Every structure is written in C-alpha cells, then in structure tokens.
Amino acid sequence: MKLSICAIASEVVPLAKTGGLADVASALSRQLTAGGHDVRLFVPFYSQIRRDRLQAARVESLQGLAIITGSHEYRVDVWKAKLPGSSTPVYLVESDALFARTRLYTGDPDEHRRFLVLTRAALECCRRMNFRPHIVHSHDWHTAFAPLWLRSNYKNDPVFANTRSVLTIHNIGYQGEFSAADAGDLDLGADAYLLHQDDLRAGRVNALKNGILHADAVTTVSPTYAREITTPQFGMGMETALAARGKAVRGILNGVDYEEWDPRRDKYLPIHFSAADLPRKAELKRNFLLRQNLKPTQGRVPLLGIVSRLASQKGFDLLTESLPRLLKNHDLRLAVVGTGDAQYEKFFAGLAEKHRGRAWFFAGYDEALAHWIEGASDVFLMPSLYEPCGLNQMYSLRYGTIPVVRRTGGLADSVTHFDPTTGEGTGIVFNDFDTSAMDWALDTAMQWFVQPDLWQKIVLNAMRCDFSWETQANEYLKLFAELLQVDAAALIERNTAQKAAG
Ligand code: ADP
Ligand code: GLC
C-alpha cells in the first residue's frame, strides 16, 4: 500500500534550520519518499531561504490563496521544489507579511498567526490538489493545530475522510501559547468548544496542548523522553494532557542521515577516516588545531568539542562551573561552536580569551565547523538538562568522538556507559544534574583517554552504532499502519522493495 502523507514543519534542511527539527523533517520525509510513499512537505518560504539555490516554481493552482485567521486575511502563494538531493516535493508557503522577518522565529505579537497560516495553508493545498492524505504529520507547536482543524473545520471534507493525524513533539519546552483574546484567529466557529476550556478561562490558548489532545497519535523523539514528559519534572505543564492520551503517546528515536554524517566521505572534511584507519582521525585533529591557532598536542592530549544551541537545556550551567576547573587541572584542547544565550556566549568567549591556544570559540551557526568538530574531536560534550533526542551525540558516535552525556531522554537511549571490565559501552554517561557528577564524567574521560587501548575499544564500539533512518522510518510506518488499521508489513515491504529497486 502506498501512503499519502502531508507533513508540515516550520524548518527543514537544507532550506532553513535552527536545530534538529530541520534535520528530522528532511530525513524522515526523504526516507519515506524513497520507500515509495507520496510525501508532500509544507514549510514557510522564509526570506532567508536561498532562492537562487533552489529550483522552485510557482504552483499555478495555488496562487493567491486566501487564508483567513479571525479578522486577518492573508494571501499566500505556494511554490514547489524538490528537497535537494531527493525526489520529495516541498511546498513553500509564501507570504511576505508573515515570513519575511529577520529571524525564522520571532517574539512578534503575530507569531502564532504566522504558523496558523502555514498549517491552514497546507490543509487548503491538500484540498485544492485533491491530495487525500492518509496521514497529516505535524511537528511541534507551530503546526499542532492541524489535528484540531481536522476535527472541526475539515471534518466533513471528503479529502480528509480517511485522514489520521500525528503530532511529533521535538521539544516540549516550546508550546506556542497565545492570548485567549486571539482565539478567534483559529476560526473555529461553533467548534470552539474543542479548545482546552480551562486554559481559555485562564486567558490563554496553548498550541501544543491542543495538538496533544486532538492528534490521533502523539509521538516524541525518544522512548525515554516519552516517559519523562508524563512527569511534572519534564512535562512542563503538558503532563496531564499527555497522561489523558495514555497509549496514544509513544517515543520513536530519531535517526541519523549517514549520507550527510559519515567520516568516510564527509564533504566538509579534507581528510576521511574509518574504524580501520584511525590515524587519519588524528591527522584531522592536527589539521583542525593548526587552522584554529590552537597549540599542537604532544602525547595523549584530548580535543573536547561542543556544537550546540547555547541554551540552558543543553546543560551549560554545569559546564560553566566545570570547564574552568578542567582547563586549570588538565592539558587539553577545547573547541566550541554555538550561538544563543548571551550569558553562555560571554562565558565561552571569556574562556577562549583566557586560555588562548587551548580553548577556541566560534559564536555563530556554521555547518562546516560542526562537521569539523565532530570529526576532529576526541570527546563530545552534551550534558543536557533535558534532551528529547539529540542528534549530535549520534553523529559523534559515528565519528569515533566519544560523547559525555547525562542520562536523560534520547541521550539515555543512544549512548551506553562504557564498562572497562566487559569492554562494552560507547560513551561516558552520568546521572545527576550537578557539578560533582559533571566533574566525575569529565575526569573519567580524561583518565580513559590516556589509556590508548581502552580508548580505542570505546571508539570502535561507538563507530559500530547504527541509528539509520532506514530502521527508524519503519517505526513511523508501523504507527501509521496501526492508525489506519492496515497491515504494517505491507507498508514496510513497500519501503524496502522500493529502496532496493532504486
Ligand atoms: P536541538 O535540535 O535541540 O538544537 P539536536 O542535537 O537535535 O539539538 O540538533 C542540533 C542540530 O543543529 C545538529 O544538526 C547540529 O549539528 C546543529 N547545530 C547546532 N548548533 C549549531 C551551530 N552553531 N552550527 C552548526 N550546526 C549547529
Ligand atoms: C529538538 C530537541 C532535540 C531533538 C530535535 C529533533 O530540538 O531539542 O533533542 O533531537 O528536536 O527531534
């Protein structure tokens, strides 16, 4: 059986990206397309998207669509392109009034309306194209109103007669809350009773919560995070809504796009390596240190790397305590690329200044540098406070760059603590979110690194891990099959047969 899937996301690589959502929206869509399914992906045509690099064409039947949100009316033009390097069609929703801003996400008063229009436009496009999706797949709060609209404004529309909705939560920390005074923007008419009523009385509308309540299935991006968010500690106010959905909530670990992240043929790196050729990784490290004016290392001195949004979610409150001590007590090199909270930018800039030649910081977003750090480092630091899935620790594993992570969310599901007695494990995993646990993990990394045989064992274990999308996309297909009450094997077989064919 061939599935028709309408996926709606606020970012997608390589067109527009601020984090892992963009990687996932792209890789999952491409994987399902390669499996023979008809996936149509809808994203905003942000002014930041490089139009010269994209062969996009206007879809004639989708020009000047009127999208009404309460008292506001927007005209959108829809363009179509291929997701670069694939045959997945991406529909770009253009509205200068909404998507020509200095950043992808803003704190502007109409922020919720920008994404209501995206979501509404995607559903309207399905109607106009007579595209009858089996699945409408929303990602995060931005597109979380699709399930509710399918139960209200579109409930009698034949195009959606057999549609099931799925909401994937990539990060519960962002919920798209807006004032109840703007509830009219949803254009629900008599179906407004479907909105979470206690929230309305409290003067707010929460996009994510309404998605959780109305989606046929709710997924998040790792099994551990799926359990964590049902607790008040991690649920950020969504735990009751999630509990109400019971078994409709599940975790599917993200995959890695190994076309993009492979040390044997990484297009950003001048030197390639594999598990059979580790001296070349050491060569890449030397090359990187030289390029960034970091002192060359003699003997076993590790390079520690970080690639991250600089947000408290990522555990920087531990690192601001532990890294200065570590740099004082050990010989090591540190390379950080990241952008975000000013306090952390300031911290890393200060560290690089103080330890010039040993610590290095690039404040910004840079795809090539991200690959360099993954490839050249010995150790990757990701001690997150919470982590729905996390991709960088999985990239690190493939590059033999040993992750130091906290046991939470997808980090717990993808990295196992190395046990020197059995020789099993792929990284260094600590439990408590406090500096003594962080110090312990960093000291362990330093102690293990100076033992070449032991370190090599961890590196080889890490490089063998396989988190490919081929496997993970099948987990989504199993879920879709359950929702549609069809045989999962038939969907997955199609997936496998198509890929084998082409
Ligand atoms: P999150 O989505 O929470 O930021 P993930 O680990 O899932 O975390 O994904 C982050 C993605 O963004 C990875 O692909 C990572 O390489 C990339 N990334 C984050 N910060 C930067 C940066 N400053 N420069 C380049 N890539 C970055
Ligand atoms: C979010 C999460 C991250 C996850 C990514 C993709 O941004 O913070 O853990 O890997 O989405 O699902």
Image (cartoon, helix red, strand yellow):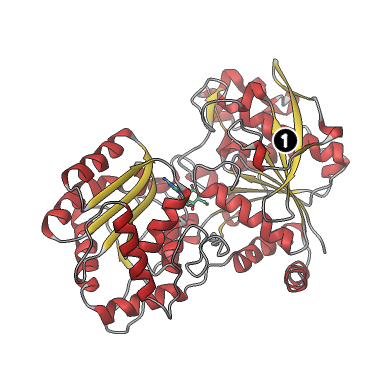
Q: Is residue 403 visible?
A: no
Q: x, y (%) of residue 360?
A: 27, 49
When the figure is inspected, residue 65 is found, relative to residue 465, above or below; the finding is above
Quadrant including the C terminus: bottom right
Pick out the residue farthest to the left: 329
Residue drawn at 76 percent across, 41 percent down? 80
Residue drawn at 78 percent across, 72 percent down? 501
Q: x, y (%) of residue 136?
A: 72, 47
| Quadrant of the image occupied by residue 64 | top right
Say whether mark 1 is within 8 Å of ligand 2: no
Q: How many marks?
A: 1
Density class for disc 1 (Cα within 10 Å; few <14, some 14-19, many ≥20) is: many
| Quadrant of the image occupied by residue 16 | top right
Quadrant including the N terminus: bottom right
Pick out the residue farthest to the bottom: 422
When the figure is inspected, residue 489 is found, relative to residue 192, above or below; the finding is below
Name which residue type carries label 1. Answer: Trp
Along the horizontal axis of the image, is 192 left or right of 328? right
Q: Name the residue carrying label 1.
A: 149
Residue drawn at 25 percent across, 78 percent down? 452
Residue drawn at 71 percent across, 24 percent down? 187
Q: x, y (%) of residue 171?
A: 49, 45
In this rendered view, identify the residue nearer to me: 132 or 255.
255
Along the horizontal axis of the image, is 117 left or right of 293? right
In this rendered view, identify the residue nearer to me: 483 or 115.
115
In this rendered view, identify the residue nearer to me: 165 or 57.
57
| Quadrant of the image occupied by residue 432 | bottom left
When the figure is inspected, residue 254 is found, relative to residue 167, above or below; the finding is below
Q: Is residue 292 visible?
A: yes
Q: Secondary structure at mark 1?
A: helix
Q: x, y (%) of residue 468?
A: 57, 67
